[in-house]
Amino acid sequence: MKSLPRWSSLMLILRREVRDQIRDRRTLFMIFVLPILLYPLLMIGMLQVLSAMEQKPRVVVVVGAEHLPESPPLLDPSGTHFSPTLFGSASEASLMVVELQPESSFWSDPPAAEQAIRHGLASAVMIIPPDLPEQLKREAEISIPIRFNSVDEPSQITHFRLKEMLARWKQHIVAARLERDKKEQGYSEPIDVKALDVATADEKGGSVWARLFPFLLVIMSLTGAYYPAIDICAGEKERGTMETLLISPASRLEIVLGKYFTVMLVSIAMTILNLLSMGLTGVQMASQFQGFPGAVGRRASTVLAAPTLQSAFWMLVLLVPLSAFFSAVSLALAVLARSVKEGQYYLTPMYITCMPLVLLTLSPDIELNLFFSILPVTGVALLLRALIMGNYDTAARYFLPVLIPTLVYAAVALRWAADQFQREDVLFREAERFSLAAWLKHLIRDREPKPTGAQAILCFTIILSASWFLMLYLARSESITGLGSVAAGQLVILLPPLIMAVMLTKSPLQTLRIAWPQTRYLLLAVGLVVALNPIVSELRLLVEWLFPISQKLRETLASLTSEGPGLIGTLGVLALLPAVCEEFAFRGYILSGLEQKRRVRSAIFLSALMFGFLHVLLSLFQQLFNATLLGVVLGLLAMRSKSILPGILFHFLNNAWAVSLPRLARMKEFEPVFGRVFRSPAEGLYHESFLVVSVIASSALIYYLWQIRFENRIRSSEVGTPEPAA
Amino acid sequence: MIHVEHLSKRFLDYERGWKSAVDDVSFTCQPGEILGLLGPNGAGKTTTLRILSTVLRPTSGRAIVAGRDVALDPSGVRARIGFMSASTGIYDRMTAWELVEYFGRLYGMQPEPLRERMETIFEWLRMNDFRDVLGSKMSTGMKQKASIARTIIHDPPVLIFDEPTSGLDILVARTVLQKIGELRELGKTIIFSTHSMHEVEKLCTNVAIIYRGRLQAKGTPRSLLEEFDQPDLEELFFHLIDRADSDGGLAEAPTRPVSSTAGG
């Protein structure tokens, strides 16, 4: 992939793949025909069900109707329905049928009545107490029991309707009394609350769509990307046309990009058509519901009202990065699969991973912030929600923070897919019998000097999950607290890389970079700590301003550094131990594994990001940014020096400074010096002049470190690259 | 021309560890020659040819195809070869004409010369009666012809055929062999793998017999029969395989990590 992809080849491949998809009857059906048929059919089906449900009147048994007063009337003169004056419309009144029963019947016996309701003989039973006329005359409080079954939905609805109706009846009674006593309406209702909703009908529609649309958009663009991806990668392998294409002059990158844009196009087309059909059906349904009586109909018609033109526009805009991301991930997985069948197996884990990410957007409590913005899928979904709901302020602020990470993830996934296309064992995979024993034997027997990238990632996931379980355990047991738990956590970080290095690599020393470095690297480590410190403090301030840490948490953290075994012990646990354990894990095993692909920058960045994520789990997500930044410097230091020691030194000094600064700041003898250096000694914030020097010095040192690769490259080419032994 | 020197390819196998599929193979093929790569299934023929077509990278050794090194300039090699095998399929949802046109365009041919070339090839292979038939509707013979057309559309100096007749009925196989023979007369460098002695006898100027990833013998069919004193190619083939099998145990011993010096 030395040369850039040629546009003409790429377009040629793209055009062919798209034509291939369009000629496939099943794809055509799924993309074009199904959405046009499916949603209207679903609507018709739903309307049928709803109308069947709505039209059936519910039976209400009224016991002791003879005790009811003449005025205001509860029943209509015929006694088969309630009085229409108690309902909004006559059609609403007709939804309940009254069945009068004498007091002597079984309906007045509670267990028997319950049984009858369960068997569906009535939806609810209303019992009129015999002393009702008397109580009314005395103006006492009267209770009218209604028996219903809350598990049975029609019975529940009937109960609500009865309550609403009785409330109206009560108003009628009160109104009669007010008239009799010549009192104003305000006598019985001193306050009349008027709720004035500022939301327009459009916005009401929007808020429901705002929850629903991001969810649908994610599901559809994922599905729309995945199936064509399987077809044009795993399917081509299966049909034998992949090899034909690979021996054509088109480069691997041109092939990957051609296929990638095909997948993206299909995904976008399918999503748009689905949403369009769904939207139109919704509009149609809303107009149907307007004919429906009561609150249910009104609500349904607002819910299903068409989303505004703006919402539709924003959906189109955000569909592109979302599709870009899903297409890249799908393509990488589809290349990995040997057959279409195997490809389909990978879809379920994809869905399961995406679900929690997108379900977050259904909860109204979750709002877009910087952390959510960098999560794949979630960021886009929340941004879309904000745009549809008209929160343009939030949307504008997070537009780039959402878009850039998503596109970066898409690029990384695409690069991964392109890498897969370079791998012989992926392109020419053949079915082989899998035996666990043989595979384990192979791991030990065929181990290489350094771990593979996959082993490095495995090591990281083991560290993450082990840390997670340890934290759960520590949270329950009260015996280990504070520094003890920190120490236990560090051991959990150290053990997996140590064990894996010894068991799975031929050269654990080289893997963990156990070697004495040149002195200049130790000096560089010290220099970098000093030079970076002002920047790191400012960054921490910035992050804490963006994401405030609660006061309670701050106190807990402060107690960690001030508690227990004096400065030396605290330094040991909070500075030395993490320096050793985390360096062996991240700059030792994990970085060694990641750099196997000879992509130095990606390896350093990825290991730094993993380092950052571990800190999110261990302490606060605010640490993500600082830890990642330091992880990059540490990775570079480890790679250039070929030793773990400069990193440990850097890490130790950095942590030691953070731990001891609050103590030093409290000491009287340092006050004059600190005053000159820091603008806020307790927080370690420097004066501006120091900041400028820091930026210049750090840049110079990092640049110096970066350019050392040329020296190293010459040296390593003398040694030659080791060959896997037979 | 094709020039192969000490070519080796090893794969990682979970059960057996690193395994040689091709081991120290060297041969040369000149323009106007057909080199027959003869060997049973699993001998390493396909691996060798896949290295020549640049889809696999050699573990060690060198291969120069049409003046380019397969490891250093794979795209240069791909532009100058035509490769066809039993596993290079054709697209189901493309017609013969579209398929050949697509590959011609991928080779960077301009529309007008491409059209002319296609008309010639379609005429030569008698493909005109099914030029608008979709791949999924073609018979095996049609597919094979479409594959050949695809292979030679850019008029490459080097042609590589990996068992092009496997699974074909004799009529189709005969046509394929005929066409390969005609290509040789056009001065192409052709390498051709098969497990059929009959095809080698009929078509090849040179033969290389490969077994267990190693080259067992190479030369013109006549010189090989004389060298090993065998009556025909079939006997020669079995003779070489027997020899390799009896040497097999000895030949593998030094590749084991345990050094043979200890045993003396």
Image (cartoon, coloured by chain):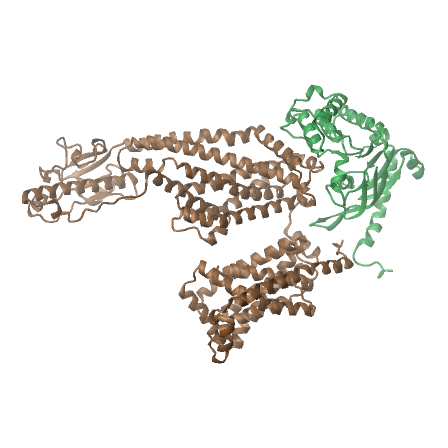
Chain colours: A brown, B green
Closest to the observer: A28 or A654?
A654
Quadrant of the rendered image containing residue A67: top left
Where residue A599 sits: x, y (%)? 66, 53
In the rendered image, the residue lying farthest to the bottom is A669
Q: Position of residue A242 (x, y in %)?
A: 67, 36
- Residue B151 higher or lower than A675, as above or below: above
Residue A520 falls left or right of residue A369: right
Looking at the image, is B17 positioned above or below residue A633?
Answer: above
Q: Nearer the viewer, residue A236 or A224?
A: A224
Query: Residue A664, percent across and down?
Result: 50, 76
Q: Quadrant of residue B126?
A: top right
- The quarter of the rendered structure image containing the N terminus of chain A is top right
- x%, y% of residue A628? 55, 59
Q: Decide if residue B248 is on the left or right side of residue A441.
A: right
In the rendered view, would you say A70 is above or below B250? above
Task: Decide if residue A245 is in sight here.
Answer: yes
Does residue A502 appear left or right of residue B65 in this picture? left
Taking the image as drawn, is residue A430 in sight?
no
